[in-house]
Image: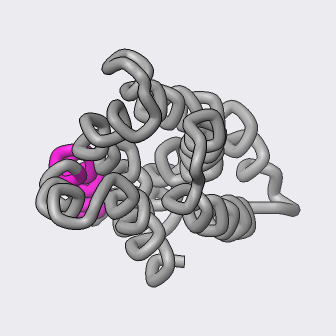
Amino acid sequence: LICLYTFVVYTGSAIYTSSEPELIDVFGINATDASLPLSLYVLAYGIGPLIFAPLSEIPFIGRSPVYLVTFLIFTIVSLPAPLVNNFAGLLVLRFLQGFFGSPCLANGAASLGDMYSMLTLPFAMIAWVSAAYCGPALGPLLSGFAVTAEGWRWSLWEIFWAACPVL
């Protein structure tokens, strides 16, 4: 589950890239501005662990509630993202997606370390790191054909559709 969670969050960063050419036309922005939603998503999942990683180390709270609450918010924020009709709203929603998706990126390895013995931990880590590496690599592939056929919003719908069963 942690691997799937990590895959969805990491895929969410790059899955947007196939939408950039159409966003330039729809919102009348330049190519640099069109890359901002990706940059804000990545920036936010760099900032999120500064809050959520220490929070999950508090014994009274633990990791599971942090994972559950933040991924629930990630999924909820992923719903209006494809429905937004202005570029500023898209920027805010992409930042929030990255921020609330970040706990698995910072604490995924620690959670696996809690669950597996030192003998089997390397195998679990291989799966988790593979999910982290495959997410951004497969994101544009997953959305490339759909965005061409259905429009720029389709890539953002795919994030929501992937997040729901994982939640």
Relative vertical location of residue 128 with respect to residue 39 in this rendering, above or below: below
* Drawn side of residue 18 relative to residue 12, left or right: left
Report if residue 7 is visible in the image: no
Relative vertical location of residue 85 with respect to residue 3 in this rendering, above or below: above
Classified by dominant secondary structure, the portion drawn in magenta counts as helix
x 39%, y 58%: residue: 153
Q: Position of residue 39 (x, y in %)?
A: 45, 26
* Drawn side of residue 10 relative to residue 165, left or right: left
x 37%, y 49%: residue: 10
x 56%, y 52%: residue: 101
Q: Position of residue 79 (x, y in %)?
A: 58, 67
Q: Was residue 42 drawn as part of the magenta stretch in this picture?
A: no
The N terminus sits in image quarter: bottom left
The magenta region covers 123-139
Q: Nearer the viewer, residue 83 or 140?
A: 83
Total numbered labels placed on residues in the image: 0
The C terminus sits in image quarter: bottom right
- Asked which quadrant contains residue 128, the reply is bottom left
x 34%, y 46%: residue: 16
* Drawn side of residue 22 relative to residue 57, left or right: left
- Asked which quadrant contains residue 77, the reply is bottom right
Q: Position of residue 59 (x, y in %)?
A: 81, 58
Q: Position of residue 84 (x, y in %)?
A: 59, 54
Q: Was residue 138 drawn as part of the magenta stretch in this picture?
A: yes
Report if residue 145 is visible in the image: yes
Q: Nearer the viewer, residue 128 or 85?
A: 85
